[in-house]
Amino acid sequence: MQRAGGLLNAYCLKEFIGPFIGCIGGFTIILVSGLLFELTDLILIRRVPAEAVLRMLLCKLPGIVVLALPVGVLFGTLLALGRLGKDGELTVIRALGLSFPRIAAPFLFAGLLVSLVVFWANESIVPRSNHAYENLVRRYILQEVTPLIKEQVFFKGADNCFYYIDQVDSNLLQGIFIYDPGREGPARLITARRGSVQEGHWRLEDGVLRELDDEGFVTMEMGFASFNLSVPERLDAYLIQQKTTDEMNRRELGEHIQLFAASGVNLTPILVDYHLKLALPLASLIFALLAAPLGTWSSGRFFGITASLIIAFAYYVLTALCRSLGINGAVWPLAAAWAPNCILTALGAYLLWRVDRI
């Protein structure tokens, strides 16, 4: 019986692997083609060197492949089980006394394995490639556009200070956070409601300056109406250090959240993305769970393709909606990140349970 189970697993995965790889290739080509169309304008309109545009394309490729992997699992599971059902093999297997959850096990294992790969890639490869892409964009496209400092983006200056600006309007800044680890004195936290970029310094207004001891406790706190912060370098030099949440992995985001927790900065958008970095990689496993019972309804490739597009579209639209609600404070960040996963997992588990009872 154990040998038969191993043969079943191998047979199911053999049916799965072809559509899985084909979908990843096709989906990647579609997304790359759309990106290439946009990047071609940089060569023709902005006169960006073709070599730089090619580097941009290569930098975006890891993120595109990672996005295609869960859709590949969804498509592969639907087509594999659909083929087994259409040719009557699924009926024969179930007649041997195997439950449908046992038949679906190899597809769930494949989904779990892909989820682990996606999580690893999102922690190690994708943030670095996104950062390289954004730096190329900043260098060739945004070099003449002000402001150079983006809002709601972390960056570290050459002075080893950490900076965060909530809103930027030309040279006017709002919601300013600066952490100075203290090279020749105590560490300092500086927060200000607003400020402006001046020649060689930032003028901060309506803020608080705190000094911290080695354990992070406040030893001195002083409010100020205005404060001139010396900036030792041109703003251009900060550009390469700026990072959006897409350019950081979950560990880096967690470190920034911990650093910023006592500053009074609104961390809700960052918290939502922090939780999403764990929730989104599980899409592959959830898609396998949902696709397995739906595969028994399949009558051919058309159903598999259509169902894959509908499910993937619904999941990512729901994720975008919940993220927006979370960022705007309408939903708790943890709930905003995990709600789509919970909804589709509950639906998939119910359908999987129901197959053997029809």
Image (tube, rainbow, N blue to C red):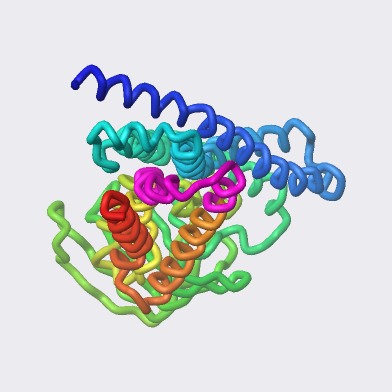
Quarter of the image where one finds residue 178: bottom left
Q: Position of residue 17 (x, y in %)?
A: 48, 28
Q: Is residue 156 left or right of residue 317?
A: left
In the depicted structure, whether residue 9 falls above or below residue 183? above
Magenta highlight on residue 292: yes
Seen from the viewer's position, the closer of residues 309 and 94 is: 94
Give the residues drawn in magenta, as a range: 282-308
Residue at point 61%, 41% (across, down)? 27
Q: In the displayed image of the protein, which residue is found farthest to the right?
A: 44
Magenta highlight on residue 85: no
Q: Position of residue 77 (x, y in %)?
A: 44, 39
Residue at point 50%, 47% (across, down)? 298
Looking at the image, can residue 103 be seen?
yes
Looking at the image, can residue 128 be seen?
no
Residue at point 49%, 34% (across, down)? 87
In the depicted structure, whether residue 329 falls above or below residue 318? below
Residue at point 50%, 39% (across, down)? 86
Q: Position of residue 237 (x, y in %)?
A: 56, 47
Prevailing secondary structure class for the magenta stretch in the rendered image: helix
Q: Quadrant of the N terminus?
A: top left
Seen from the viewer's position, the closer of residues 68 and 142 is: 68
Q: Position of residue 47 (x, y in %)?
A: 83, 43
Q: Is residue 266 left or right of residue 228?
A: left
